[in-house]
Amino acid sequence: MQIIPDEPELAPDLTEDGDMDGRERKLRDVSASAGAPDVSADRDATTAKGDELAALLSQHRGERHIIVMQSFPDPDSISSALAHQMICSRFDIQCEIAYDGAISHLENIALVELLKIPLLRVQDNDKLPSYQGSIFVDNQGTTSGLTERLISAGVPVLAIVDHHELQNIIEAKFTDIRTDCSATATMYAEYMEGGLLRLEPGDVEHARLATALMHGIRSETGGLVRADRRDFRAAGYLAEYVDLSALLGILSSQRSRHTMDVIHKALKSRSVRDNYSVAGVGYIRYEDRDAIPQAADFLMTEEYVHTAIVYGIVVKDGEREFIVGSLRTRKPTLNPDSFLKDALGGAAPGHYYGGGKREAGGFEIPIGFLAGRHDEEYMTWKWRLYDEQIQRKLWAKLGVPDERSE
Ligand SMILES: [Mn+2]
C-alpha cells in the first residue's frame, strides 16, 4: 500500500468554522491521508440518497404503503422494513410490513416476537389494491411472490433499497441499490443518522429499532466478522440505543428439530471435492425452507470447505413444488450471483433461477409437469432425477470432475 504523507493543514475556508461539520470533515481527511479506504464519499452519497428519499416521502404524505420483504424474510430485511416503517410514520405514511412465505428460522421468530414487530403475511389479493405504493427492501422483487401480485393490483413501486446484484425486474421512483454494502440494515442506519430518524436515548421504540438493525447487521456479516468500516460505523451509531437483553434473547434461540433433521441429511449426503461441499436433502416441508441456508452455513464449518451448496425439493401443501437451494462461499473469486445464473440458467431470458450477493446466493426452480405427490417409488425417482441434474450442472460449472458414481 502506498503511504501518502500527511496533507498540509486544511485552509480555514474549507471548514465551516467551529461546528461539528468542520471537525468531522477534518477527521475524515486525516483517515483518508493514512491510506485507509475513504468512506466519506460513501457517506456523502448516502446523505444525498437520504435527502432524495425524504423528498419522495413528503410527496406521499397521508398515504398507505406496503413494504415488501422476500418470501422468507431474514433479520436484515425485517429490521430494514421496520426502519422504513418508522421513518415513514414521521411523514404521516402508514406502512405494513409484508411477506408471502413463512418465517421458520427460530432466531427470526424470536426477533419478531421479542421486539413485537408486526408483520403481515399476505395470502389473498383482496386488500392489495388499497395500497398507494410499494417499497421493496433488501430485495428487488425477484425473491418475493408479492411482486407480480402487486403489479397486477396496480400498486406503483415507489422505492427499492437493497444491496443485492441489480435484477432489473421492477422500476421505482426512488432506487438505492448498493452491491458494495454488506447489509440493507447498514443503509437504513446511515439514512437515520443522516437525519431521517435520529435516535433518542430512553425512547422504547427507538431501542426496539436499534436492536433489530444491530441484529440485522450482525447476522448479515457473520456476527460482524465480515463487517467493513461502514457496518462498524452503523453498529457504532446503534450501539448505545440497543436493548442488550432483547439482543441476547434473539441470539440464544436454538434450532428446531426439523432444522436439525435437514442438517443431518445434508451431512449424510454431502460430497466434498476441491473444497466444495454440495448436498441434496430431498423433500422438505414449506415451513422448513429456512433450514436449507442453515444447513449450508453448517457445511461451511467443515475444515477446508470454502463453498457449500445445499438444495432440496420444497413441497407446499402438496400443491406447489420447487427446488430451493442456498450457496455460501468464502472464495473471493466466486461471485454467487453470476455463478448461479451461469450454472443453472433460467426459465426465460432475464429471468434466472438464482442470484445472490457477496458470499451468499440462492436459487428456486419450479417443478412444473412432474409436481404432485404419488407413490413412494415415483417420489424417489423424481428426487433422483432433479438431484442428478443439479449436481451435474453445479460440478460442471465449478470445473470439478463429478466422481459420485465411483
Ligand atoms: Mn440483506
Image (cartoon, rainbow, N blue to C red):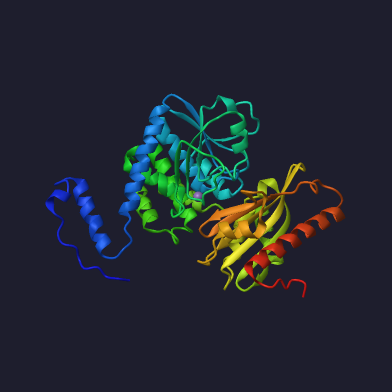
**Looking at the image, which residue is at 74% across and 71% down?**
404
Image-quadrant location for residue 101? top right
Query: Which residue is nearer to you in this view: 371 or 375?
Result: 371
Question: Residue 104: horizontal and vertical position, in percent?
Answer: 61, 46
Q: Does residue 171 appear left or right of residue 257 in this picture? A: left
Q: Does residue 116 appear left or right of residue 258 in this picture? A: left
Query: Which residue is nearer to you in this view: 298 or 22?
Result: 22
The residue furthest front is 349
Query: Which residue is nearer to you in this view: 202 or 13?
Result: 13
**Looking at the image, which residue is at 30% across and 53% down?**
40
> Is residue 197 among what the camera can see?
no
Image-quadrant location for residue 204? top left
Question: Residue 244: horizontal and vertical position, in percent?
Answer: 41, 49
Question: Residue 267: horizontal and vertical position, in percent?
Answer: 67, 65
**Looking at the image, which residue is at 51% across and 53% down?**
252
Of the 4 image quadrants, the one containing the C terminus is: bottom right
> Is residue 219 among what the camera can see?
yes
Question: Residue 250: horizontal and vertical position, in percent?
Answer: 50, 49
Of the 4 image quadrants, the one containing the N terminus is: bottom left
